[in-house]
Image: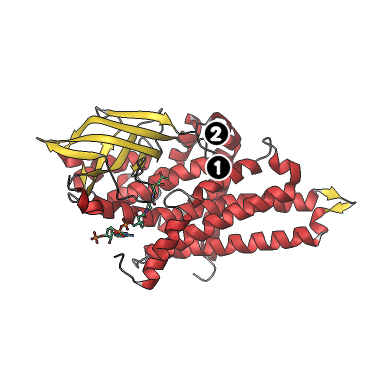
Amino acid sequence: MLDYIEYEDFRAEVRAKAGEVVAPYAAAIDADDHIPDEVMKEVAKAGWFGATAPAEYGGLGWDTVRYVIMVEEVSRASGSVGVMLAVQGSLIIFPLLEYGNDAQIKTYLPKLASGELVGSFGLTEPSAGSDAGNTKTAAALDGDEWVINGQKCFITNTKRDWPVVCVVTVRTDPDKSKGARGVSSIIVPADAPGFNYGRKENKMGLRGSDTSEIFFEDCRVPKGNLLGEVNGGFKIFMVALDAGRISIGAMAVGLGQAALELAIKHAETRVQFGKPIGTKQAIQWKIAEMATKVRAARFLVYSAGALKDAGHPYTKEAAMAKYYASQVGREVAYDAVQIHGALGYDKSYPLERIYRDVKLDEIGEGTSEIQKVVISRDILQIKKK
Ligand code: CAA
């Protein structure tokens, strides 16, 4: 594992594929706020929707390190496609495999792995952001069905022109004092009666990745759609987020890498005062710092993935990877824009898109401030109250 050198051939293959089937569309995905069918089909053909699903369900059966390298390389080509695969693999397929029963796995996993279904993670609500346990959406049993009422917002992968399944947190214990211990997880297909999309969120970046409000109005799903135990859903979402934070870190590394490469090329070719600007120490130092930070962030991400693959605890390391990589991604994109001057600010060049896209990584799947709460709680071993 010394330098993850054994993954470099694998990376080269994924990079070449992403360069062929994703990168040429990246600007249009951003401008049109939409991932077109041809990209969805090519991503499906590459097997990336089901990268971590076992082969018997149509997946590629990759370990976490390979999976995050794929998310990194796809994000290097397009952040919008990268985040879609990060959510699919980490927040949906992973908890389904961990907590799903046979019937749930057989019903949903093959379609998620093939890309026939896109998975979304319905946690956030208007009053449950960082305080994710403050779920107000409620579910109650009526015979053999759960009846769900409430509202979610900022839900990624709510692709309106594609079949979607959403795993949602719902309050199943009306006693509010139970907090996160009164929350369950339920699998809700977007075509269930009473499932309605609200506003498509108008985001700064990742414009091609659909993010929406969802309203549940007497939404009915079979009793068997409960994922895990009644009132055990918050923990499932926390476990999923541990995995998700590694892939959000990978996304930030991919976007940071893309910005770094553009900055290097510009430093080598842009001539001012009679010489390439890369001959100036002001630029050399920036490039050195950017490259060092991207490399350090990459290793944090891979080592969290390797811990997960080895079956060790990785909550803290996943939070560290996301916290550090997303900060690095944002700083590197900022420096790359600065090195480009006005060209970095121009919408006809890819940098301003990268700059907007990478900001999400410091917010989605828990803000940087929440990552520091998670890291310090683990280090200090102090119970909350
Ligand atoms: N693994 C397993 N269990 C966990 C856990 C973990 N990582 N973290 C917490 N738990 C368990 C606790 O052990 C506790 O269990 P018991 O009831 O058995 O004691 C239970 O969950 C409640 O834990 P806490 O008391 O620690 O919960 P809290 O209310 O203090 O919140 C928090 C903890 C870390 C702040 C959490 O709320 C959090 O992560 N907030 C951020 C939310 C977030 O990341 N949102 C992202 C939205 S989804 C998204 O962005 C996806 C997308 O669309 C791109």
Tell which circle, 2 or 1, labels the residue nearer the N-terminal end. 2
Q: Position of residue 171 (x, y in %)?
A: 22, 44
Query: Above or below — where is 193 with respect to 317?
Result: above
- The kind of residue tagged 1 is Ser
Q: Quadrant of ligand 1?
A: bottom left
Q: Callout 1: few (<14), some (14-19), or many (20+) C-alpha neighbours within 10 Å? A: many
Asked which quadrant contains residue 205, the reply is top right
**Residue at x 39%, y 44% (from the top left corner):** 88
Question: Is residue 232 at all visible to an observer of this figure?
Answer: no
- The kind of residue tagged 2 is Ile
Q: List the residue tagged with mark 1.
A: 78
Direction from residue 111 to residue 141 in the image, left or right: left
Instruction: Assign a secondary structure to mark 1.
Output: loop
Task: Looking at the picture, tell me which residue is in the foreground, 221 or 303.
Answer: 221
Task: Looking at the picture, tell me which residue is in the foreground, 225 or 65.
Answer: 225
**Residue at x 25%, y 52% (from the top left corner):** 180
Instruction: Assign a secondary structure to mark 2.
Output: helix
Direction from residue 241 to residue 136 in the image, left or right: left
Query: Above or below — where is 28 with respect to 96?
Result: above
Q: Is mark 1 within 8 Å of ligand 1?
A: no
| Distance of label 2 from label 1 (alpha carbons) | 8 Å
Q: Position of residue 361 (x, y in %)?
A: 50, 50
Q: Are marks 2 and 1 in contact (CB under 8 Å)?
A: yes
Label ID, residue 70: none
Label ID, residue 29: 2
Q: Position of residue 172 (x, y in %)?
A: 19, 44
Which image quarter is the C terminus in?
A: bottom left
Q: Position of residue 65 (x, y in %)?
A: 45, 59
**Residue at x 53%, y 58% (from the top left corner):** 325
Q: Callout 2: few (<14), some (14-19), or many (20+) C-alpha neighbours within 10 Å? A: many
